């Protein structure tokens, strides 16, 4: 259920994955790109598409948390270099942090508070601290790093934000299920695909070739269009929830 393809380059890995998928009585994939890629690798079994299962949290979890912040704020969800580079050496990530810090400077200068919230604390925590260090000291009173070791903690921290700037897939998804519009700095296909699926492709920049000016323009537009984007996000998430309800019924019918 809800299988997503990130990378599958090793021959033995492909063998085990495809063997497992062929043995299943039911297969569902969280985006069309995943299914196309697996078919290209040799999967021929009947398959289904469904949204990421985390969208089911919309009705069960998100409404149980009061909004903590009274002043307008944005949440920033950074990502670790270890996500895509094994040896930790990649100048693109250093540029990513500096461009993101410049965007935080701009938002703080506009009077917004900036909450840096990790959806993968163990990997991303040190980079959240580093990001705060790169932001201009004169804005330090408007910046804070928020601890969110559990799903419920992350949801509580981002609920009520004007927007979320996210780089992790589930940082974006958990923000969307609260009804908050997302601007994505996408390091990988699955994040770009999510933003396209939710109708926010225009608010996506690719990590490999973005600039602080381009990111700020996306953020400015999202803030200007926030009421309409909130309605769009809420409607799309409700559609995803209905699709997942059907998926769960289909799986239960197998029993």
Image: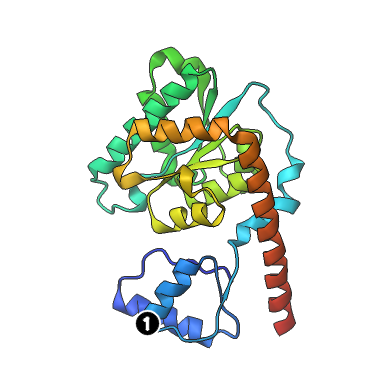
> Residue 36's spot in the image, x, y percent?
43, 73
- Residue lying at 36% horizontally and 76% vertically, measured from the top left: 13
Taking 88 as reference, is 63 left or right? right
User: Foreground: 245 or 209?
Assistant: 209
- Colour scheme shown: rainbow
Picture quadrant where residue 147 is located: top right
Provide the secondary structure element on which disc 1 rests.
helix
Decide: few, some or many residues near mark 1? Use Cα within 10 Å; few <14, some 14-19, many ≥20: few
Residue 55 visible at all: yes
Name the quarter where the N terminus is drawn.
bottom right
- Residue lying at 61% horizontally and 47% vertically, measured from the top left: 176
Residue 150 visible at all: no
User: Foreground: 246 or 94?
Assistant: 246
Query: Above or below — where is 7 with respect to 192?
Result: below
List the single residue furthest toward the top. 138
Query: Above or below — where is 19 with respect to 181?
Result: below
> Residue 252's spot in the image, x, y percent?
73, 77
- Residue lying at 48% horizontally and 24% vertically, measured from the top left: 107
User: Foreground: 31 or 88?
Assistant: 31
Query: Above or below — where is 13 with respect to 86?
Result: below
- Residue lying at 37% horizontally and 24% vertically, measured from the top left: 133
> Residue 89's spot in the image, x, y percent?
23, 45
Name the quarter where the C terminus is drawn.
bottom right
User: Foreground: 10 or 226?
Assistant: 226
> Residue 234's spot in the image, x, y percent?
68, 47
Picture quadrant where residue 38 is located: bottom left
Which residue is disc 1 drawn over? Answer: 15
């Amino acid at each position: 259920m809800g299988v997503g393809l990130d990378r599958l380059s090793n021959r033995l890995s492909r063998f085990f994955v495809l063997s497992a998928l062929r043995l299943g009585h039911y297969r569902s994939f969280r985006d069309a790109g995943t299914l196309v890629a697996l078919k290209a690798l040799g999967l021929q079994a009947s398959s289904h598409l469904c949204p990421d299962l985390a969208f089911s949290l919309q009705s069960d979890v998100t409404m149980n948390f009061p909004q903590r912040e009274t002043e307008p704020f944005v949440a920033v969800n950074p990502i670790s270099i270890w996500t895509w580079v094994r040896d930790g050496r990649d100048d693109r990530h250093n540029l990513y942090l500096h461009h993101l810090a410049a965007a935080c400077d701009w938002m703080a200068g506009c009077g917004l508070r900036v909450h840096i919230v990790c959806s993968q604390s163990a990997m991303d925590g040190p980079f959240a601290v580093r990001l705060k260090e790169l932001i201009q000291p004169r804005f330090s009173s408007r910046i804070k790093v928020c601890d969110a070791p559990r799903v419920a903690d992350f949801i509580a921290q981002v609920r009520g934000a004007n927007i979320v700037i996210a780089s992790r897939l589930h940082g974006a998804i958990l923000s969307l299920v609260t009804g908050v519009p997302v601007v994505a700095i996408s390091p990988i296909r699955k994040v770009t695909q999510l933003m396209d699926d939710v109708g926010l492709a225009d608010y996506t920049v690719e990590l490999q070739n973005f600039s602080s000016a381009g990111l700020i323009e996306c953020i400015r537009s999202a803030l200007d269009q926030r009421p309409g984007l909130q309605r769009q996000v809420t409607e799309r998430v409700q559609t995803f929830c209905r699709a997942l309800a059907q998926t769960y019924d289909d799986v239960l019918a197998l029993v």
